[in-house]
Amino acid sequence: MFALPYAGGSASIYRDWISELKPEIEVCPIEYPGHASRFCDPYYSSIEAAAEEISETILRKNPSDYVIYGHSMGALIALETAFVLEKITDILPKAVIVAASRPPHMRNKGINLRELSKEELLQTIVSRGQFEPEILECEELMEMIADILYADVQMFTRYTRSYEERKIHVPLLALFGEEDEETPQEDMQEWQKYTEQDFSLQVFRGNHFFAFNNHTEFVSYLRKYLKEGEKKK
């Protein structure tokens, strides 16, 4: 499972999944440039640019059986990566899993993050419960995070994609937290329009970061979903 982080997140957010899902599922977290271990690399300029590089990363692994998971901003990158893969290879994911994100054609519903200053953006993200208390107490670290968040937001708020243009040809699973005001069920159902294959929708207890704050329940569901997909092959 190639796992794509949310805005401001790094590959390390998936460290618990690596141990909890093995040996049945190998979790391969993707690190975005400008983040954590790739801090010195220039940020992605667009979702499309991210998808191009991540597609190459996936194919270098030469996987025969894989899925792509994306959380929040990562969901948009996951979708676009699937589009790129369908253009360049026959080795397609068994499923694309999108979590905590409205579909592209509804991306601008609600707060327009692009209009916020770095400080306002950081306050908005903090209010969603993304950071541990000890991180919030480190001013220097929070300033660094604000820069990363700002760069990510500039990227994904420019993203435009319509289900009328194109659909993927692999199953799509959409996940959301019942307390996440950004992703009501009726909006998440709209992801169905982006695939020609099976679509599933699942709700979990928790907020925007349900997959990490309540990850034991989530990982259990994910393992079951992937095993059922294996049986259908």
Image (spheres, rainbow, N blue to C red):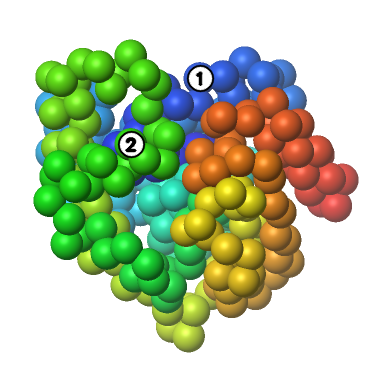
The front one of 67 and 110 is 110
How far apart, in angstroms, are the residues tagged by discs 1 and 2? 21 Å
Determine which of the numbered discs, if any, sits on residue 5 in the image: none
x and y, in percent, of residue 186 in the image: 62, 71
Residue at image coords 61%, 41% = 206
x and y, in percent, of residue 124 in the image: 30, 46
Left or right for 145, reference 56? left
Q: Quadrant of the N terminus?
A: top right
Amino acid at the residue labelled 1 = Arg
* Mark 1 Cα shell of 10 Å, populated few (<14), some (14-19), many (≥20): few
The front one of 182 and 225 is 182
Amino acid at the residue labelled 2 = Val
The front one of 49 and 65 is 49
Residue at image coords 75%, 38% = 221
Left or right for 233, reference 189? right
Left or right for 187, reference 84? right
Q: Which residue is the site of mark 1?
A: 15
Task: Check if mark 1's residue and mark 2's residue have beta carbons within 8 Å.
Answer: no
Determine which of the numbered discs, if any, sits on residue 126 in the image: 2
